[in-house]
Amino acid sequence: MIDFNFWEIGGLIVLAILIFGPDKLPELARKTARVINYLREIGNDARGQLRKELGPEFDDIRLSDLNPKTFVQRHLLSGDEIADLRQIRDDALDAGTLVKETVTEARDDINGLDQKKTQAEPAASVTVPFDPEAT
């Protein structure tokens, strides 16, 4: 969840002592602990109320299971299906690479033919009729 190392915690403690002073810091820590405990109780009460409303058939459900990504992975896909989906993904990537190479080769062939054609035949002068009143 939250990842603090030793130096970050030490820095926060020093910063708290400088801001609030050593006299008010214990009282502030107690109030912070009470707020965190109160928020935890609210979360547990909401979770308990949700379980009560859903009934006994949903006792084994976890709230993390309600995340769509986790739900699909856990309930709809088995290990074999995931392996099949990865194989399909790899096949599609290979096919995309093959198509890209083919298009690149065809483009190079067309460019080569155009260069040969322009080298073999001098460009014909084409006169385009111009109407100054049309613009």
Image: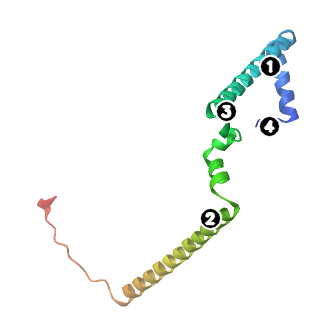
Residue at 16% x, 58% y: name it: 135
Q: Earlier in the sequence, mark 2 or mark 1?
A: 1
Q: Report which residue position mark 4 lands on.
A: 3
The kind of residue tagged 4 is Asp
Residue at 79% x, 37% y: name it: 3
Q: Earlier in the sequence, mark 1 or mark 4?
A: 4
Separation of residues labelled 2 and 1 (CA atoms):
47 Å
Instruction: Check contact, mark 3 vs mark 2: CB within 8 A.
Output: no
Separation of residues labelled 4 and 2 (CA atoms):
34 Å
Q: Earlier in the sequence, mark 4 or mark 2?
A: 4
Q: Quadrant of residue 134?
A: bottom left
Instruction: Check contact, mark 3 vs mark 4: CB within 8 A.
Output: no
1 vs 4, front mark: 1
The kind of residue tagged 2 is Leu
The kind of residue tagged 1 is Ala
> Could you say where residue 16 lies in the image, as x and y percent from the top left?
81, 19
Residue at 51% x, 76% y: name it: 104
Near-viewer residue (128 or 56): 56
What's the mark number on residue 85?
2
On screen, 122 above or below 135? below
1 vs 3, front mark: 3
